[in-house]
Amino acid sequence: MINSPGQHICLDDLLSRQTSDQHPFELLSSLCEGAIAVDADCRIIWMSPKYRQLINIPEDKELIGTPIEELLPTTQLPRVLKSGKPTFVDLMQINRRWCVVTRMPLKDHDGTVMGAIGFIFYTELESLGPLFDKFARLKRQLEQQKLIRPSRYALDDLIGQSSVVQQLKRQARRAALLDTTVLLLGETGTGKELLAQGIHHASPRNGGPFVGINMAALPESLVEAELFGAAPGAYTGIEKGGRKGKVQLANGGTLFLDEIAEMPLAMQAKLLRVLQEREVEALGSNSLEQVDVRVIAATSKNLKQLVDEGEFRADLYYRLNVLPIRLAPLRDRKEDIPLLCQHMLESIQKQAQIPALELTDSARQWLYQYSWPGNVRELHNRLERGCVMAEGSAIEPEDLGAFDDLPTSETCITSFSPQLRAPSLSLSEIRLRTDKIALEQALEKTGGNKSKTAKLLGISRATLYERLKKCQANK
């Protein structure tokens, strides 16, 4: 039976239903397009005939006892087996065909995981078209009724309990009350667009549109039409009624100009008119259009320096720099990392429909000691990578890419020590000496502190002592 609320299949109950002429798994496989089951060691214990046909396995080929990953390298059954948690309605490509699959752990009455089973419910995704269409209609309905907020953020979505984040939220709330231009300053990946949307939603303009545009992603030839619109006949291929620009689309709401430093000088004068006169002139038009728009600009560059170098208009800079708000880099608010990780992991796992994964202690240590040049965006990307690469129920430092930037054996041979360039060294000897050099450098950097050394290397203290012992024994 499937235990409420559908978290696993009770193996004892299933086996009790076995008849003399029918395998118990066939009772379940008859309801789907194919099924496969593995034991606690992730070895195949059963496969339905339909599944064999799908993966082109002859009926007479013996598969019992074969490790599942030898047959299906991309299978997620080992993860279900290790985590003890199911994955519902996932997509998997088998022999170049996309299939809708469900995977569930097999447990005994004591809750011990005895194996796992995977079901294929659909091999023709076209048959799911009406279901996808219905979901899309319901989503549009909810958006129109404003019951959900698509791709929008409030200030409460800014995750963190550090004093830096709390001060940032206070500044943003005060800025939201004033209907004036805001300039967001901060490194790439610090969350400037999230904060801009939060300010918009906390302002009296929250009933109006929020329109964002990344100036760095726009070719210079398209900037004017994209920002300020184009009149009918302004260029070949334009719509009969002309084209509205982002400024006109944001009328009554907020215009977010990301990477404002990348705006061409010629367009900066037109933006200045929007800010000062609240009017815009479309490309190819001789008339001015009144607009009611609040501008929030953002940059990761030093605008004042660009002004001094003649790369940015001074009058526009001072018009933008009315309410400057600086976002701190992640390395300056590392106490927020645990909360950010919790929030991001829940989001990633929900979106990807994978079992919940936790961070090991060594992974948390590495996250805390890392310098985060890519800030919060990089943290999200590394956690997403960890969820994909983790093979068990926990994410290790290597799953996060902790050792990607460590020197290879070849680098160590050529750069670290002349002793490693000896042609008679075996691969194991090279690895051992490379480990020794890395350990010595880390110990020197931390003043011999073992705990700090382990954190610096992204390993546990037990692993550190084990490697030190091995290096000592092979002196």
Image (cartoon, helix red, strand yellow):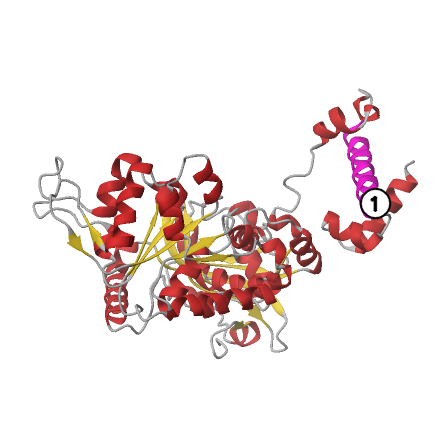
Q: x and y percent of residue 383 in the render?
A: 55, 55
Q: x and y percent of residue 307 in the render?
A: 43, 40
Q: x and y percent of residue 231 in the render?
A: 12, 44
Q: Is residue 157 magenta?
A: no
Q: Is residue 371 left or right of residue 325?
A: right
Viewer can see residue 121: yes
Nearer to me, 62 or 37: 37
In this figure, which residue is indicated by the disc labeled 1? 443
Q: Which residues are magenta?
A: 425-446
Viewer can see residue 22: no
Which residue lies at the image location 26% right of the left edge and 49% below the top edge? 273
Tell me the quarter of the picture where residue 192 sits.
bottom left
Q: Is residue 435 magenta?
A: yes
Q: Secondary structure at mark 1?
A: helix
Which residue lies at the image location 45% right of the left edge and 44% below the top edge? 303
Q: Amino acid at mark 1?
A: Leu
